[in-house]
């Protein structure tokens, strides 16, 4: 499990890492640097490849729900499942003001303070959702590979892209799909 963490406290991030590693021993982690966010933070290639996100919305500077912060969160999540830590009390409006059904990715929202048991359960649910999303992507890739294998040999180039069959009555140099370069 590749996990992207955006948690401001080093101690809290380490605690989350320990819990995730107890569930998935081969887990790897990428941490977004701490800072107040007024825009979507830039992600490294390693961060973009994570399939589970654990974010503290207060630490990201998005303690209060707004259309803008919801949009920035959706961009940052990029379709990945997430466990989100909400501020205590009303949850900064994330529980009540948030548009229903606006999120396409599975999200589990935990209001601070969070117990280790609640976090473990949330990670389990988000991890299963993340696994299903990865499984769907893998299935689509397998289907594409199977389709490519079942195409007649003349319909594939060395790169695997389909091309029209050689036309009768043309020389090899006249066939545009056979040109090199």
Image: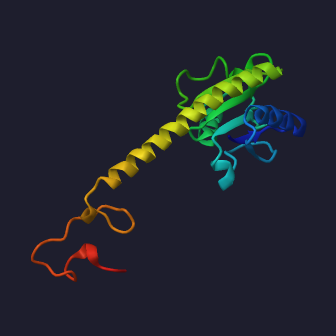
Asked whether residue 114 is in view, the answer is no
In the rendering, at what x and y percent does residue 138 appear? 49, 43
Front-most of 164 and 67?
164
Dividing the image into 4 quarters, which one contains the N terminus? top right
Coloring basis for residues: rainbow
Q: Residue at x 53, y 27 (%)?
A: 102
Residue 103 position by quadrant: top right
In the rendering, at what x and y percent does residue 60 appear? 76, 38
Seen in the picture, residue 97 relative to 50 is either above or below; the reply is above
Asked whether residue 23 is in view, the answer is yes
Q: How many marks?
A: 0
Front-most of 53 and 161?
161
Residue 9 position by quadrant: top right
Dividing the image into 4 quarters, which one contains the C terminus? bottom left
Q: Residue at x 30, y 52 (%)?
A: 150
Q: Residue at x 83, y 39 (%)?
A: 8
Residue 36 position by quadrant: top right
In the rendering, at what x and y percent does residue 101 appear? 52, 23
In the rendering, at what x and y percent does residue 165 appear? 20, 66
Seen in the picture, residue 89 relative to 179 is either above or below; the reply is above
In this rendering, would 160 be left or right of 46? left
| Residue most extreme to the left | 169
In this rendering, would 68 be left or right of 155? right
């Amino acid at each position: 499990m590749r996990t992207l963490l955006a948690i401001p406290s080093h101690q809290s991030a380490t605690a989350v890492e320990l819990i995730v590693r107890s569930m998935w021993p081969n887990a790897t982690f990428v941490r977004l640097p701490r800072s107040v966010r007024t825009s979507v933070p830039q992600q490294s290639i390693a961060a973009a490849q994570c399939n589970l996100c654990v974010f503290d919305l207060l630490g990201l500077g998005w303690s209060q729900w707004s259309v803008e912060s919801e949009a920035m969160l959706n961009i940052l999540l990029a379709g990945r499942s997430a466990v989100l830590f909400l501020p205590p009390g009303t949850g900064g409006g994330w529980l009540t003001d948030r548009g229903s059904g606006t999120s396409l990715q599975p999200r589990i929202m935990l209001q601070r303070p969070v117990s280790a048991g609640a976090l473990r359960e949330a990670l389990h649910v988000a991890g299963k959702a993340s696994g299903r999303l990865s499984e769907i992507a893998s299935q689509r890739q397998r289907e594409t590979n199977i389709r490519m294998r079942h195409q007649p040999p003349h319909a594939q180039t060395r790169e695997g892209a389909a091309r029209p069959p050689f036309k009768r009555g043309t020389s090899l140099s006249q066939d545009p799909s056979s040109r090199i370069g």
